[in-house]
Image: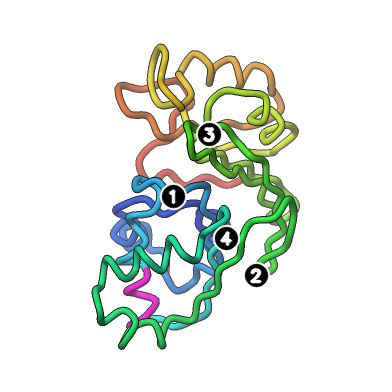
Amino acid sequence: MVDGRVLLDGGAPLLPHMHRLGVDPGDIEVVFLTHFHGDHTLGLPPFVLHRVFVDRRPITFVGPSGVEDYLEKLWEVSWGPDWKRVMRPQFKARYVTARPSGTVAGVRYETVRLDHGTMGGTGYRIHVNGKVVAYSGDTEPTAPLDKLVDHADVAIVEATGPGDVFSHMSWEAAAKLKRRHPGTRFFFNHVYSGTVSGAVKDLQVIEV
């Protein structure tokens, strides 16, 4: 989450973490999705439940092509026939297919298409309070990733594990990326086993 109102992907358990941090889920104005794998989206259904029954402020979801179809199917699988009949009419959401650059809910962004297995991913450069936050989601350590993080103030980038990691970035590749961009502050997530220098801590909050 960035600036208390921008959510970057929606892995589980999203809503409990927000409550633990004292974050109001109703304050989220825009959600940027990098891709549609479950570990990046399956925290969203309980969050949406909150936005249907507790706080009905408008919200925008930005994601790759097909974002509306994917998410509406996810909501329907999660909540069954009551989704369309009872819940959807109360859910003030709009869906936006990510463009090369744009502004959503007052947040300016640029995108970079990243390599991630067959699906690929959409990386974002988010402009907030005069700073640039680069967010990769899942990615391989290929040239587009360097473009994404270049001259960003902060980069939130995955570092799945040691050695050869299919469709993801290894610790070794993450360390090399950090050395190539010394002016960027890196935070590594998606760490599946052990740890790596620069890895984020659980529920870590930083000021930039």
Give the structural element (helix, strand or loop) at label 1: loop
Q: Residue at x 47, y 31 (%)?
A: 117
Q: Residue at x 72, y 63 (%)?
A: 103
Residue 147 covered by magenta stretch: no
Callouts 4 and 2 close, C-beta under 8 Å: no
Mark 4 — residue? Answer: 62
The quarter holding residue 65 reads: bottom right
Disc 1 packing (10 Å; few <14; some 14–19; many ≥20): many
The quarter holding residue 133 reads: top right
Instruction: Report the quarter where the C terminus lies.
Output: top right
Q: Residue 131 appears at what percent x and percent y? A: 71, 48
Magenta stretch: give its range: 48-53
Q: Which mark is residue 36?
A: 1
Which one is in front in this view, the residue at disc 4 or the one at disc 2? 4
Mark 1 → mark 4, Cα distance in angstroms: 12 Å
Q: Residue 102 appears at what percent x and percent y? A: 73, 59
In this rendered view, identify the residue nearer to me: 82 or 39: 82
Whether 155 is drawn above or below 99: the answer is above
Whether 139 is drawn above or below 62: the answer is above
Mark 2 — residue? Answer: 105
Which one is in front in this view, the residue at disc 1 or the one at disc 4? 1
Q: Which mark is residue 157?
A: 3
Q: Residue 197 appears at what percent x and percent y? A: 46, 21
Mark 3 → mark 2, Cα distance in angstroms: 24 Å
Disc 3 packing (10 Å; few <14; some 14–19; many ≥20): many
Give the structural element (helix, strand or loop) at label 2: loop
Which one is in front in this view, the residue at disc 1 or the one at disc 3? 1
Disc 2 packing (10 Å; few <14; some 14–19; many ≥20): few
Q: Which mark is residue 24?
A: none
Whether 33 is drawn above or below 169: the answer is below
- At label 2, the amino acid type is Ala
